[in-house]
Image (cartoon, rainbow, N blue to C red):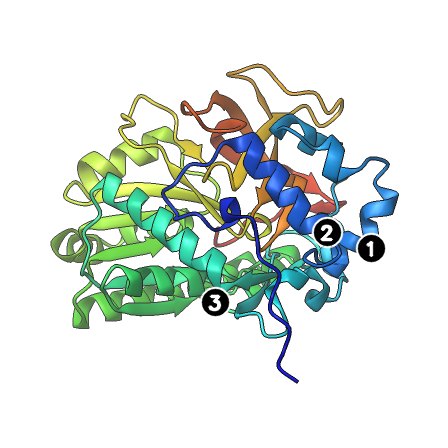
Amino acid sequence: MPAAANPVADPLLDLPFDAVPDPDEYLRAAMRWHFSPETGSPFWLARAAGLGFDPLTEVRTHADLAKFPNLAGELRTARVEDLIPRGYGDRPEVVGVYESGGTTGAPKRIVLLRDWLDRLLGWSSAQLDGHGVPQGVNWLVVAPTGPHMVGDVIKAQTAYRGGLSFTVDLDPRWVKRLISDGKGAEAGAYAEHIVDQVAYLLETQDIGVLMCTPPVLERIARRDGLAALVGEKVRAINWVGTQMDPDTRHLYRTEVFPDAVLYSGYGSTMILGNASERHGLTDDDPCVYDPYSPYMSFGVIDPETGRTVEYGERGQVVMHHVSKSLLMPNNLERDHGTRIAALPGHLGDAVADIAPVQEFDNETVIEGVY
């Protein structure tokens, strides 16, 4: 007997990456997909009755996402197969299972499906074009690989843009453990080991884009010969992590790496991607991040009261992901940020001046190589 056809999704859930749906219509289509027995994931279908509201009738606008409890913590133990919507059928194209973690507590796990990755790559590549990052060049990616998501996604991004990837693996969990155990010197030696690998690749290969974290970039900048090599070869530097102060950012742009585009992304495994630094910022502007609306959106709240802070005020970042492949609303992240008005037509808020909280889920936050 032939296999049954997969349920047909609302066309709003399968638009091209650069099409902008009506946000309320899109949200309602997503609720129908995630909470219909034929298409929803076992994870959400099992929890629907205990939500205290009906997502099919009571989630009508973006503001209604606040009705959802923060269930991200359950992803530490949830069966990952239960996160995949049934509408994908018996053979969903899974790119990988990835974990959060590296600075706090036990990891959470998420599933990356091919259709979302393709959409993310299209959007991210357009953001890179807007920053003036060249296509058709090789990337040197200094980032965590499995079980983390970022390394695999950036390798796919490089291929999408016509280049080859050279990788240096970071192990943030090992660095966290070293620092937690008071072995700061060993953590520093590990970081120098990372930079040694960066140097060798830059000496021997054609590298057009360097991706690394601020602590690694700082160590690269300390080595005069290596900084000069970056200036000679690299046309763009993508720093990822949580923070770089404005003075350092200005110094890199004007004195240390003046010939390279310096730009940033702010990502989270729990939203299956990253927000992009806003185009056209000056050194006098804070580093503002805009998520991929309407699929990703941010809020900034007072963690004590849960209320949204005023524009220009700081609070804890809340993230929402609503796509065909995943529903993860109202996730309180481990970062503080300044609330900034979103771009016209974008849902929620933009955020700036990201910095980790001191403690999250009863764990001290240790950034290490981030």
Reading the image, the residue beneath label 2 is 36
Q: Is residue 120 above or below residue 65?
A: below
Residue type for callout 3:
Thr
The location of residue 189, given as percent across then percent down, is 45, 64
Q: Which residue sits at x=25%, y=59%?
A: 161
What's the CA distance linking mark 2 and mark 3?
35 Å
186 horizontally vs 236: left or right:
right
The location of residue 364, given as percent across then percent down, is 69, 46
Reading the image, the residue beneath label 1 is 46
The location of residue 114, given as percent across then percent down, is 48, 64
Q: Is residue 65 above or below residue 102?
A: above
The kind of secondary structure element at disc 2 is: loop
Q: Nearer the viewer, residue 288 or 296?
A: 296
Mark 3 residue crowding within 10 angstroms, few (<14) / some (14–19) / many (20+): many
Reading the image, the residue beneath label 3 is 145
User: In the current view of this chain or complex, which residue is farthest to the bottom?
Assistant: 1
Is residue 348 among what the camera can see? yes
The location of residue 251, given as percent across then percent down, is 26, 35
The kind of secondary structure element at disc 1 is: helix
The numbered disc on residue 253 is none
Q: Quadrant of the N terminus?
A: bottom right
Residue type for callout 1:
Ala
**Closer to the N terminus: mark 1 or mark 2?**
2
User: In the current view of this chain or complex, which residue is farthest to the left?
Assistant: 232
